Image (spheres, rainbow, N blue to C red):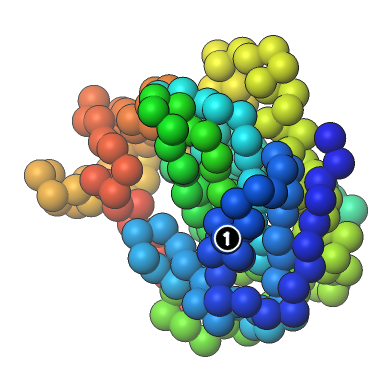
Amino acid sequence: MKAVIEHLASCPSTNSEMAARLTAPHGAAVTALEQTAGRGQRGTSWESEPGANALFSVLIRKNVPVAEQFIMSMLVSLAIKGSIDRTLAEHGSERRAKIKWPNDIYVGEEKICGILIENILRGALIHRAIIGAGINVNQTKFVSDAPNPTSIARITGDRIPLTPFVEEVIESIIERFDTYYAAPDPYKLKSEYMDSLMWTDGEHPFTDDFSGDFTAHITDVDFDGTLTLSNGAQYAFKEVVFNIPPNH
């Protein structure tokens, strides 16, 4: 289906704007050139130079079982990764994005996208999901203490037309959901997600509260989002830290 996209110059948060549109249809979206109170996971903020990046929220109405909320996370991260990869290729870069569990998007060991999914429940179903994302597109200088940011423009050296890019990303997300829920195949989806994850081979530095610092790689992610490492340890979201070296 075709997205219904509302473009705003500025707003506190595109997720908040989308949440206020209670009767909006499936596939409705809000974009903004600037967020004055943009939010990330667990109350973090998202640095974005006004007019430089893709800031948007998409409304999904699928009545998905609560147990499938990580399925939704996989669908979103794969859709956004695909859009970033297509744009990198179109602008001559051979580099490609990877997903940092659970759903951040990185190129190499530099973060290019953050995702925030907020679910509205009705009984045992996710009645509405608001998918918010910030993708670094044309910003080349970052002043916050956020670790290792990058952007499409930094990677390619090109300035990317912002409106066509953000509209393509939104359409890709909606298409992912509509295609998947027309004929669900969770094992195929998980296989694609695992193939797109960073740190699935070699030895990489992690930290948890029990073991402290150690090295391992990812061997599995369950359908509920549980992460399994090569040392046999399993983690829910926020229980383990990826010790990505700073790029400066």
Question: Which residue is drawn at the image coordinates 47% and 49% (left, top)?
Answer: 118
Residue 217 at x, y percent in the picture:
37, 36
- In this image, 160 relative to 71: left or right? right
Residue 189 versus residue 156 in the image, above or below: above
- Residue 214 at least partly seen: yes
Q: Residue 229, how many percent across, how many down?
A: 31, 31
Neighbour class for label 1 at 10 Å: few (<14), some, many (≥20)?
Answer: few
Which residue is the extreme one toward the front? Answer: 23
6 on left or right of 240: right
Based on the displayed image, in which of its 4 quarters is residue 139 positioned? bottom right
**Residue that label 1 marks:** 20
Locate residue 83, reporting x and y percent: 76, 47
Q: How many marks?
A: 1
Quarter of the image where one finds residue 111: bottom right
Vertical comparison of 180 with 79: above or below: above
The foreground one among 129 and 137 is 129
